[in-house]
Image: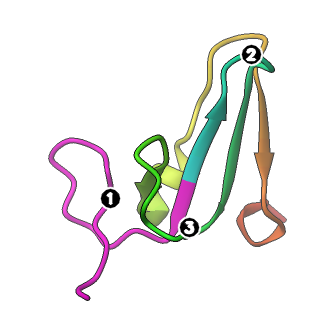
Amino acid sequence: MGERICSKVGCTREAVATLTFDYAGRMAALGPLGAGNDPHAHDLCWMHTERLSVPQGWTVLRHASFREE
């Protein structure tokens, strides 16, 4: 299996994280690359992981490896 690419349109960087959403709970979770078979998960490169923003009122849960120090 080849490398996984960022899900952002036009981005060709290698994915380093997987983003999932809980719409009912207004929450986004960012963690290590998932299994790759969830159509509702989005792989992101490091740049898009750093730039991640969510709508006002939402919470972002970041895995410890993606937290700013």
Q: Which mark is residue 55?
A: none
Vertical relation: 23 (above or below) 4: above
Left or right position of 68 against 6:
right
Predominant secondary structure in magenta?
A: loop
* x and y, in percent, of residue 9 in the image: 20, 41
Q: Nearer the viewer, residue 45 or 42?
A: 42
* x and y, in percent, of residue 2 in the image: 23, 86
Q: Which mark is residue 34?
A: 3
Residue in the image at 67% along x and 20% along y: 23
Q: Which mark is residue 24?
A: 2
| Quadrant of res 68 | bottom right
Question: Could you tell me how far apart the alpha carbons at marks 2 and 3 are, in whole angstroms?
Answer: 21 Å
Question: Could you tell me how far apart the alpha carbons at marks 2 and 1 are, in whole angstroms?
Answer: 25 Å
Which amino acid is tagged 3?
Gly
Residue in the image at 84% along x and 65% along y: 69
Which amino acid is tagged 2?
Ala
Earlier-in-chain disc, 2 versus 3: 2
Residue in the image at 49% along x and 71% along y: 16
Residue in the image at 83% along x and 67% along y: 64
Earlier-in-chain disc, 2 versus 1: 1
Give the secondary structure at mark 1.
loop
Give the secondary structure at mark 3.
loop
Which residue carries the number 1 mark? Answer: 6
* x and y, in percent, of residue 60 in the image: 76, 37
Which amino acid is tagged 1?
Cys
Earlier-in-chain disc, 1 versus 3: 1
Q: Residues within 10 Å of mark 2 (few under 14, many from 20)?
A: few
The span shown in magenta is 1-18
Q: Nearer the viewer, residue 45 or 43?
A: 43
Left or right position of 26 against 13:
right
Instruction: Specify the farthest residue to the top.
Output: 56
